[in-house]
Amino acid sequence: MFPQNKINMNKRKLIDFFLPFPWNIHARILFFCLFGSIVFVMIFGHENLLQSFIGGTSIMILDAEIIYWISRSLFNSTKIGSPRDVTFQIIWRVVVFFLMIVVVGTIVASTVILLLNLKMGNELSLAIQNIIRFEIKGIMGSLIVGALIATLAFFFMIWQEAMKSAFKAREQMLIYQSETLKNQINPHFLFNSLNTLSSLIPTNPEKAETFTQKLSVIYRYILENSEAETVPLEQEIDFVNDYYFLQKIRDEEKIELIIKIENKNCRILPVSLQLLVENAFKHNTATKEKPLRVIIEQKGDWIEVRNNFQPKKQLGTSSGVGLKNLEERVKMQTGKKLEIEKSDQKFVVRMPLICTK
């Protein structure tokens, strides 16, 4: 390990108080509450410093712990979408966080002060009146100042989280694009296409010309959309039909593709449907007696690709890299998961769409 990396790791351990998650969070809460309470007592404390220190520390620890558990469950479902969506999510979370600090802090501080008043012998009604008349303004003022500071720190953490997610999404997109191009522009696919083309030229020149045009359209589509996040569903369907045309010439009556689309005003990840169709052709046997039937069917905001399950017996173990990359990209782009269903009769993959009503 490099010395600089070792120093950074030691700093990280020190910041975490040498504790694993989530205990490091609670240790930080305790440290900052004790430190904040000491500073508060030194600046604003009166003759009973011990009581001020205990009361202030108790209030801050209760506030921090309640806010931590609420925010952990409330903000644990961030989705990666467009920059506008991410910005809206960050603003919404920051506003909710600020209001949560003020509300929770007011309740906790009022409760602690009320208990202290009761312990000193004051009646309940008198204690409540004292809080409303004299304490509530000071509580709200200090909470708003504290909430602003805490919200700025929280906003910085959320911004860092969004940046990390954006970089990760970009990295995964590049991996997906690379794998897509590698899977499509490979010697095996090109060899089979050129083989088919060479056999068509002397026997059926017209079909050979159409085959050449479709092949060029396929590669142009891949190259033009290599950096696109989404494409119109209609374009992806056209691309799949072109790809199926090439496969159909080679496999004749062994394969069948059926497409049922309800709403064309949807967008989809580029080359995603083609990848699923290709997987069906690649991993299943197809004969004239038992043809492979692939069905693409839209169901609301989802699109389903299913085929009769006829696995090749001599096929080696599949790495599943293409499907894994697609699954990760779908999750990052839409916030939803790719649904995969497998049985002895069929193999089904459901993918979310981005549709406009």
Image (spheres, rainbow, N blue to C red):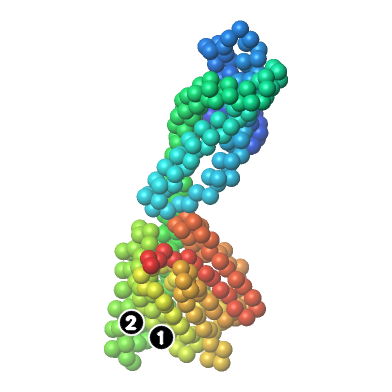
SS for callout 2: helix
Q: Is residue 279 left or right of residue 204?
A: right
Image coordinates for residue 350, horizontal then vertical, percent: 52, 69
**Is residue 149 positioned above or below 80 on the image?**
above
- The 10 Å Cα crowd at callout 2, few under 14, some 14 to 19, many 20 or more, is many
Q: At 47% across and 33% down in the image, what residue appears? A: 151
Disc 2: which residue: 211
Disc 1: which residue: 249
First in sequence: mark 1 vs mark 2: 2
Q: At 64% across and 76% down in the image, what residue appears? A: 343
Q: Are marks 1 and 2 in contact (CB under 8 Å)?
A: yes
Q: Is residue 288 left or right of residue 343?
A: left
Image coordinates for residue 223, horizontal then vertical, percent: 33, 64
Instruction: State whether residue 300 appears in this view.
Output: yes
For badge 1, the amino acid type reads Ile
In front here: 334 or 71?
Answer: 71
Quadrant occupied by the N terminus? top right
- The 10 Å Cα crowd at callout 1, few under 14, some 14 to 19, many 20 or more, is some
